[in-house]
Image (tube, coloured by chain):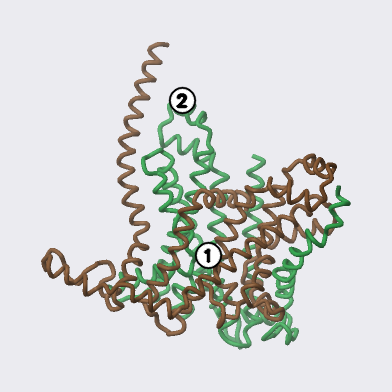
């Protein structure tokens, strides 16, 4: 017995030593892999400060000359010839109307998500608490809508949106609420089913109206699902291209993805200097958001994956 | 209680119901109806029966293989990406649950591309691909295969981090007791993976496989931005093929809508199989 314990301990020590050594090696390997992983972003950032001609002449380097064969002095001179400061950004800023595009993207994403959260959480509560043919049909249709690809409805949806004058940043909120309702209703009903009725009944007996009960009791309990739906829907709406491109009046309202795509179309070929700068400007808000909300984003993704 | 809530139907249900009607119900059913019509907008329809569906495959007596090619190309693309994404994501997840130093940083780095949308992502890679390929006097759209692998790389780069996060959570959910018991029984690390980790992860693997499967089938943004279907419609995945049919030239809207119906049925069948499979797993 004692011998076995000793052996076991020895084996454990060996395994921890091995694990630690492996750990060090793995750390080095993964440092290299993850740097390669984000290297494309580094290249784009670097190229956004280069003169147009050098983006393809010298895509991965920072100087016209080699440090080894041409010497330090020439190398330094080469750097100055390759880069020209913020001029791509100024160009892109004017060409794409980036601040406007950013504003539209932000406005549409924020208010669509607020509308989705508010309306579908109320609807989900109603669906679970009021049992009728209508609510069960509505719920089934919501589930059904989750498997329908956008191409199936894109033509009719964009034409109807046009008829109803929804082709502006306010109107598109209705479209997003409608097309995004399926997932949100599904997530919220799943959660409402787990809330015990007694809490709500207690609130109502204490004199709360259904509206007060919902906003003071039910909604606060639903906070985790609210976070999940917020993350999932905002990731979708912020990056969405086809729906706003078809629904919005494209001459007046361009979101960021549309502005990026139209940088190509309006010229036939691409102004790569401006493109690099726009890409960097499009990525920066995402990186900042990610830095602050990483925990919620990962949790949202997990909750969404398990349920969806 | 039900009665008192019911009175508030206009407040609780109506906004979502109306938006759902505009944003999904009417477009969906009207879309099915229009697939049997000739039309240029939603009001000038003329019933033509199954003509749109036959025009997908035969045009003026000539066989048109564009759509069949697209189905085949999409299927191949989906299979390749499903395999690569899941294998790589799983391998990374396995390594990142060993408690090595810097795990948090690695996870953050791998997940980051997922937050960047398809359009922006595609132009980042278009620049890089063209920079590399110019040395071989090629572009992304030189052939359908250069387009194919460009798309595969972009989509893998985008989704591996996402699936990795799900796999990590799955691995962390396996009870340490189970692993310890296997270790005491003398299982080596390969046996541990084969007989403990993989079986315990079956539900996670199902989820990730179907997520990547539907993502592959529905891919649009990257296809549009990166290859645009070039060369000569050969790199068109289904979603882009439908889009170009519908908006490429007038008179083809009905055919585009008919293709969309077929596309919907394909995606629907995949989802149904997924539903069945995850249900049967729950029982077992």
User: Label for residue B75?
Assistant: 1
Furthest toward the top, the residue is A2
Subunit ID for the residue under disc 1: B
Disc 2 is placed on an element classified as loop
Q: Position of residue B52 (x, y in %)?
A: 67, 81
| Residue in the picture at 66% in, 47% down | B279
Disc 1 is placed on an element classified as helix
Question: Circle 2 is placed at which residue position?
Answer: B185
Q: Position of residue A258 (x, y in %)?
A: 51, 75
- The image quarter in which residue A24 lies: top left
Q: CA distance from mark 2 to mark 1?
A: 43 Å
* Relative to B181, residue A111 above or below: below
Q: Position of residue B46 (x, y in %)?
A: 74, 86
Graded by Cα atoms within 10 Å as few (under 14), some (14 to 19) or many (20 or more), the crowding at tag 2 reads: few
Q: Colour of chain A?
A: brown
- The image quarter in which residue A21 lies: top left
- The image quarter in which residue A277 lies: bottom left
For this rendering, which residue is in front, A128 or B85? A128
Share a chain, discs 2 and 1?
A: yes
**Residue B273 visible within the image:** yes
Q: Colour of chain B?
A: green
- Residue B260 left/right relative to A286: right
Subunit ID for the residue under disc 2: B
């Amino acid at each position: 017995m004692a011998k076995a314990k000793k052996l076991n301990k020895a084996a454990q020590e060996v395994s921890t030593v091995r694990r630690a050594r492996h750990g060090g090696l793995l750390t080095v390997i993964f440092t290299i892999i993850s740097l390669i992983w984000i290297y494309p972003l580094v290249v784009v950032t670097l190229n956004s400060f280069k003169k147009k001609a050098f983006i393809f002449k010298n895509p991965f380097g920072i100087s016209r000359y080699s440090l080894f064969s041409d010497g330090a002095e020439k190398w330094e001179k080469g750097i100055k010839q390759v880069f020209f400061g913020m001029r791509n950004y100024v160009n892109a800023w004017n060409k794409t109307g980036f601040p406007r595009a950013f504003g539209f993207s932000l406005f549409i994403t924020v208010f669509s998500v607020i509308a989705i959260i508010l309306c579908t959480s109320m609807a989900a509560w109603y669906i679970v608490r009021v049992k009728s043919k209508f609510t069960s049909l509505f719920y089934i249709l919501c589930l059904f809508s989750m498997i329908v690809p956008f191409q199936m409805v894109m033509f009719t949806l964009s034409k109807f949106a046009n008829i109803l004058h929804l082709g502006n940043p306010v109107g598109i909120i209705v479209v997003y609420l409608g097309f995004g309702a399926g997932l949100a209703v599904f997530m919220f009903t799943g959660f409402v089913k787990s809330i015990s009725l007694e809490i709500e009944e207690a609130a109502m007996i204490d004199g709360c109206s259904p509206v007060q009960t919902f906003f003071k009791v039910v909604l606060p309990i639903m906070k985790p699902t609210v976070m999940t739906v917020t993350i999932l829907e905002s990731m979708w709406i912020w990056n969405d291209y086809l729906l706003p491109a078809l629904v919005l009046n494209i001459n007046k309202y361009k979101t960021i993805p549309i502005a990026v795509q139209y940088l190509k179309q309006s010229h036939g070929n691409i102004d790569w200097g401006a493109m690099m700068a726009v890409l960097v400007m499009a990525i920066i808000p995402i990186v900042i958001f990610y830095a602050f909300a990483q925990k919620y984003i990962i949790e949202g993704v997990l909750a969404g994956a398990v349920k969806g | 209680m039900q009665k008192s809530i019911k009175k508030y139907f206009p407040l609780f249900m109506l906004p979502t119901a109306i938006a759902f009607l505009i944003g999904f119900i009417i477009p969906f059913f009207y879309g099915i109806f229009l697939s049997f019509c000739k039309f240029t907008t939603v009001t000038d329809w003329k019933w033509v029966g199954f003509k749109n569906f036959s025009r997908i495959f035969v045009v003026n007596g000539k066989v048109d293989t564009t759509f069949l090619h697209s189905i085949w190309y999409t299927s191949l693309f989906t299979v390749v990406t499903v395999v690569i994404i899941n294998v790589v994501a799983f391998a990374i997840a396995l390594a990142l649950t060993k408690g090595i130093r810097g795990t948090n940083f690695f996870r953050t780095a791998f997940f980051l591309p997922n937050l960047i949308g398809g359009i922006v992502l595609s132009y980042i890679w278009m620049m890089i691909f063209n920079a590399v390929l110019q040395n071989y006097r090629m572009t992304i759209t030189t052939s359908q295969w250069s387009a194919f692998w460009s798309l595969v790389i972009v989509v893998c780069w985008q989704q591996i981090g996402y699936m990795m996060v799900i796999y990590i959570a799955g691995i962390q959910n396996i009870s340490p007791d189970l692993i310890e018991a296997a270790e005491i029984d003398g299982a080596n690390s390969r046996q541990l993976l084969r007989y403990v980790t993989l079986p315990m992860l079956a539900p996670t693997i199902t989820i990730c496989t179907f997520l990547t499967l539907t993502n592959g089938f529905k891919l649009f943004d990257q296809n549009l931005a990166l290859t645009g279907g070039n060369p000569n419609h050969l790199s068109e995945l289904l979603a882009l093929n439908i889009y170009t049919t519908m908006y490429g030239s007038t008179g083809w809207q009905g055919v585009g809508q008919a293709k969309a119906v077929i596309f919907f049925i394909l995606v629907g069948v995949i989802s149904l199989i997924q539903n069945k499979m995850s249900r049967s797993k729950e029982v077992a």
